[in-house]
Amino acid sequence: MEIIADIPVRKTNHSSISEVDFNKLEFGKYIADHMLVCDYAGGEWKQPQIVPYGNLSLSPSALALHYGQTVFEGMKAFRMHDGRINIFRMEKHYDRFVKSLQRMCMAVPTKDIFMDGLVQLISVDEAWVPTQQGHALYLRPFVFASEARFGVKVSDEYRFIIFTGPVPALYADPIKVKVETNYIRAARGGTGFAKCGGNYGASFLPTQNARLAGYDQVLWTDAKENKFIEESGMMNVMFVINDTLVTAPLSDSILDGVTRDSLLTLANDMGYKTEERAIAITELEQAFKSGTITEAFGAGTAAVVAPIKTININGIDCMLPEYDENKLMFTLKNKLEQIRLGMEADVHGWNYII
Ligand SMILES: Cc1ncc(COP(=O)(O)O)c(C=O)c1O
């Protein structure tokens, strides 16, 4: 089918925007008035619709609820300095969405449904895009298996939904992380590179254990030997060792983070040394001993960079030096934010301006 041009809109009569204090946003608390819904059945995507945000009616036997065919994206739209709205790196998010869906054997919404859907949904809820600097409209596209059937099978029916919600700038306090060597997040040949629900469900228990032990997040290690750093809970991880920005290489057990890619690109543009290579836990231990590790941080859409102050390795807390605004992570973060706001040239074509 795929008739998208002007997506039909059914507007809400009860906007909840007046209930939102845009100066006191909390991540994940508020949801904008409308959502996009598009069904897949009979081998094709139907006409998308924009409707008031609300509960779904779903069969208890919907396959996603049992066998985990569910994939999502997390991305943001920003209010630029001139008031226009910018969807950041929409194409790269779409490409990752496609890879995730293919891995989970799910129907893939066309690029037009994804992109036109986002643009038209954001246009309808334009008033929800915050004006405060650093705040954003978080965008959550996702697909789940909606076929009602309880035998284990690949679903023949899917629902694609996008909802959005305003989120604050996260000026995260430096976090404490614990290197995890008992549990694993993802194994070679598994689904680590896909943004599928099961990856997150499986990470909750080890993360909860780390929290009980006084840490904010786990640092995942490779599934085969538990020797190499992979990534963190909802972030890729980067280090500055010997003045070089170092991060684990992409593989099928690591999510291809859009922020990771953006920061690496900017660091290269600005002439910093970067390396995508395996990082052994023993190398980190050595770097702490010799004082050659000067920064560690998470990279992700939520906070851009999340400074790390402590890394627990084999039960020992290794402390990073105090951070100041001259650190590389903040230089890169500022550059990224300036590009998103339209204050610096977007030489890589990352901004999709509505
Ligand atoms: C497991 C995992 N790794 C890394 C990231 C960072 O990816 P991005 O920069 O695209 O937000 C995320 C967040 O989406 C994640 O869930």
Image (cartoon, rainbow, N blue to C red):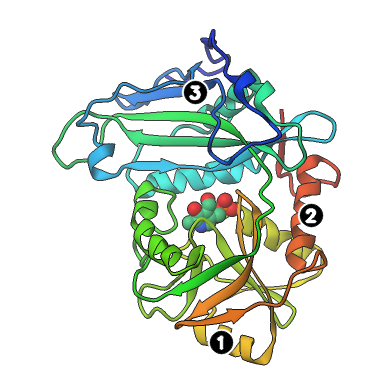
Q: Give the numbered dot on residue 285.
A: 1
Using the image, determine if residue 51 lies above or below residue 197: above
Q: Is residue 154 visible?
A: no
For marks 3 and 2, give the CA distance: 32 Å
For marks 2 and 1, give the CA distance: 30 Å
Residue that badge 3 annotates: 36
Percent across and percent down for residue 199 are 38, 54
Q: Which element is circle 3 on?
A: strand
The local crowd at label 2, few if under 14, some if 14 to 19, many if 20 or more residues have their Cα within 10 Å, is: some
Instruction: Give, as a three-letter code, the residue at label 1.
Output: Glu
Depth-wise, is mark 3 or mark 1 nearer the camera? 1
The local crowd at label 1, few if under 14, some if 14 to 19, many if 20 or more residues have their Cα within 10 Å, is: some
Percent across and percent down for residue 75 are 58, 42
Residue that badge 2 annotates: 334
Indicate which disc, 3 or 2, sits on the residue closer to the N terminus: 3
Instruction: Give, as a three-letter code, the residue at label 3.
Output: Leu
Q: Given the current orientation, which residue lies at the most extreme left position? A: 151
Using the image, determine if residue 124 lies above or below residue 252: above
Using the image, determine if residue 66 lies above or below residue 118: below
Percent across and percent down for residue 83 are 81, 28
Percent across and percent down for residue 95 are 53, 45
Image quadrant where one finds the C terminus: top right
Instruction: Give, as a three-letter code, the residue at label 2.
Output: Asn
Image quadrant where one finds the N terminus: top left
Q: Is residue 341 visible?
A: yes
